[in-house]
Amino acid sequence: MAAHPAPVRTAAETAAPPPAALGVLDDPSNRRGPFRPGRLASVRERLSGPTLARLFRYMDYAAVAGVTVAGAMVQAPAGPLAQPFGAVLPLIAVSLAALWALSSLRAYGFSSRETPQRHAARIAGACTLAAIAGLVAAALADPGGMTQVEAFAACIFAALSAVHLWAWAAVRHWRSQGRLTPNVVVVGATDNAAMLIQSALDSREVNVLGIFDDRSARSPADLHGVPVLGDTHALLEHKILPFVDRIVITVTASAQTRVRALIEQLRVLPNAVTLFVDVEGQDTRAATLSRLADTPLTQVAGINEDERRAFHKRVQDLVCGGLGLIVFAPVMAIIAVAIRLDSPGPVMFRQRRHGFNNEAIVVWKFRSMRHEKADPIVVSQQVRKDDDRVTRVGRFIRRTSLDELPQIFNVLSGEMSLVGPRPHPIGMITAGEESQRLVAEYAWRHRMKPGITGWAQINGSRGPVHNREEVRRRVVLDVEYIERQSFWFDLWIMLMTLPCLLGDRDTIR
């Protein structure tokens, strides 16, 4: 049964925020704050700590397995199976004990506060425990093999040290790029906000980029150096939002009316919102901060469902997108030649569109309009029937959706997905008004990467939208897809896309 999306309201049903003051970060000398990295990485570029921890753990498995096989071959040139089990038992004991000890000693944390020396000590401790386990096994099964156990443990230590040296350097590099430390903004310049920021300064697990507070007349200019960038109305359209993983409301729990009002205001954004109230005690603050970070490298026992879905979706995009590029490469070459022969101008058309979390991305398409009449910045006039801007080749590739094929490159780069809400141009106009103003929850469709095709497209919502109801219906279908998304659901949508396109001769494209 299809999941029912949350009710979608029109903009008239909510208070329209005034335009945001987008120049609040123009003076970097006093508005950047202590957390602002040299380069802001978008949420789409953020790396998953649990996924990386699992990757590093698999690398350790591979390294230990390789050393174990090599050691067994050296010990028994005729093959390990030719040796009695007691002779290879110490090697197995060392290998298993090393892997167990690495997890027990939290060698996959890579905390920003942990020194390389301390991390190396964890590796040495794990290998020491492994050597002890191997010596005990040798004493019980093959006392003459104790010397070999020591040499084998030393090889294990060398292999694991090499793996973790690379992992340490990689994590440090990703942190410097802002791809591992989550970015948050705080709503409410309160004592809770000050405690949160101080804890973040101590741990460096979270970057607090700024503070927003409706009581601007009473709020300070900054808290612990983190600047107050405006009120919540300014936050709703602030240019920093595509780089923000989470919005944290730090208003005291006793102000229930204010908290409800803030949640109602912020619910229209694609960003996650967290309520952070009445924090007491350093231990509680530290625990809450770790939950806010949401990327603990120590979480290796399992990956939450959202991360698992995102991982499977990315693998699906890479595999199917790569195969699609190979299959359609000849078709794309023919279309490129036809466009060049049909009308002057570039073969490709590039346009800035909304991506995941409201990030601005550049989407590639085959040019289907006359170059001098194309609108790469804002779609002020959507395509209409018998539009004289469309070329002869353009009519064919738009009717068959072949003009979308270059977006495979957007998929492979990670900006888009094969299946998802279609990316709309930034500033798209519908019925004389900006489309995102017509439906309050319009940005909800940006809670997932945009796609080449989607649930809305196979349900008839394709091409331009001409009025408020068409915008509303597309948002409803897009939100429904986001709530239902799965590996098999995506495959079904991909399979149904071609029949739906071929059977639709009425939609203007």
Image (cartoon, rainbow, N blue to C red):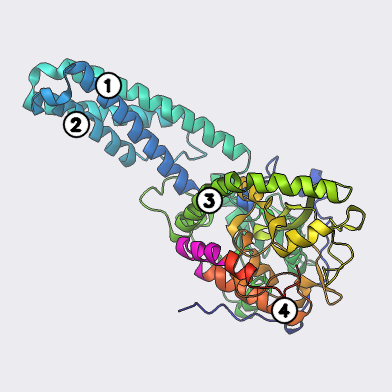
Dot 3 falls on a residue whose secondary structure is helix
Dot 1 falls on a residue whose secondary structure is helix
Q: CA distance from mark 4 to mark 1?
A: 65 Å
- Can residue 172 be seen at all in this image of the molecule? yes
Q: What residue does disc 2 label?
A: 93
**Sequence-earlier tag: 1 or 2:** 1
Dot 4 falls on a residue whose secondary structure is helix
Q: Which secondary structure class fits the magenta region best?
A: helix
Residue 426, percent from left and from top: 78, 61
Label 3 sits on what residue type?
Answer: Cys
**Sequence-earlier tag: 4 or 2:** 2
**Sequence-earlier tag: 4 or 1:** 1
Magenta segment: 484-496
Pick the residue in front: 298 or 463: 463
Q: What residue does disc 3 label?
A: 320
Between marks 4 and 1 in the image, the one whose residue lies nearer the viewer: 4
Q: What residue does disc 1 label?
A: 70
| Quarter containing the C terminus | bottom right
Q: What residue is at 43 percent from the left and 41 percent from the top? A: 55
Label 2 sits on what residue type?
Answer: Ala
Dot 2 falls on a residue whose secondary structure is helix
